[in-house]
Amino acid sequence: MNRSEVFGDHKPIIGMVHLDPLPGAPGTEGLTAVLDAALRDAERLTAGGVDGLMIENYGDSPFYPEAVPKHTVAAMTRIASAVSEAVDCPLGINVLRNDAEAALSVAAAVGANYVRSNVHIGAAVTDQGLIEGQAHETLRL
């Protein structure tokens, strides 16, 4: 699915739902607190007129440089499912730092419309070290 299939011909404004630290991350207040904050943010962003939402585990810093643990995928799936049910707009998933496989998995499970991968092709030097794109795997998945 490409951008015009989701948003039409205009350039969309995507509202970011930056999740608080998920269970297992430093400083977490638990899944219920993260879920409540995500729902509040999603409702406010859609009421403000965004064209779509992007959910990402922004509060999980320091980020895993590649694959996140399974409990992160489970928590993000639970939250994305609740957000998808609560608001009526296109939804995207980004799993930081660069876990495109997890993002695609969460998106498929909740019926999200798109994903984001910070480094899909090429490489980037980040605060987690060298991150290399995995497009050869992501596109096959």
Image (cartoon, rainbow, N blue to C red):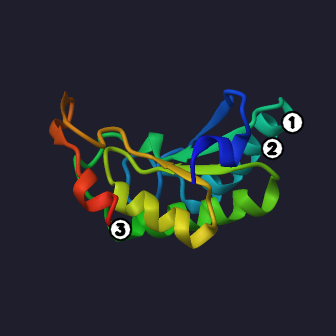
Q: Give the CA distance from mark 2 to mark 3.
A: 31 Å
Q: Amino acid at mark 2?
A: Glu
Q: Which residue is mark 3?
A: 141
Label 2: few (<14), some (14–19) or many (≥20) C-alpha neighbours in 10 Å: some
Q: Residue at x 68, y 47 (%)?
A: 6
Dot 3: element: loop
Disc with the residue nearer the chain's start (2 vs 3): 2
Q: Which residue is mark 2?
A: 43
Dot in front, 3 or 1? 3
Q: Is residue 71 left or right of residue 53?
A: left
Q: Nearer the viewer, residue 115 or 102?
A: 115
Q: Nearer the viewer, residue 46 or 74?
A: 46
Displayed quadrant of residue 136: bottom left
Q: Amino acid at mark 1?
A: Ala
Q: Give the CA distance from mark 1 to mark 2.
A: 6 Å
Q: Which residue is mark 1?
A: 47
Q: Amino acid at mark 3?
A: Leu
Marks 1,2: beta carbons within 8 A: yes
Dot 2: element: helix
Q: Is residue 48 left or right of residue 36?
A: right
Residue 91 is situated, as x and y percent measured from the top left of the image, at: 65, 51
Residue 5 is situated, as x and y percent measured from the top left of the image, at: 67, 48
Label 1: few (<14), some (14–19) or many (≥20) C-alpha neighbours in 10 Å: few
Q: Report the label total.
A: 3
Q: Quadrant of the N terminus?
A: bottom right
Dot 1: element: helix
Q: Give the CA distance from mark 3 to mark 1.
A: 34 Å
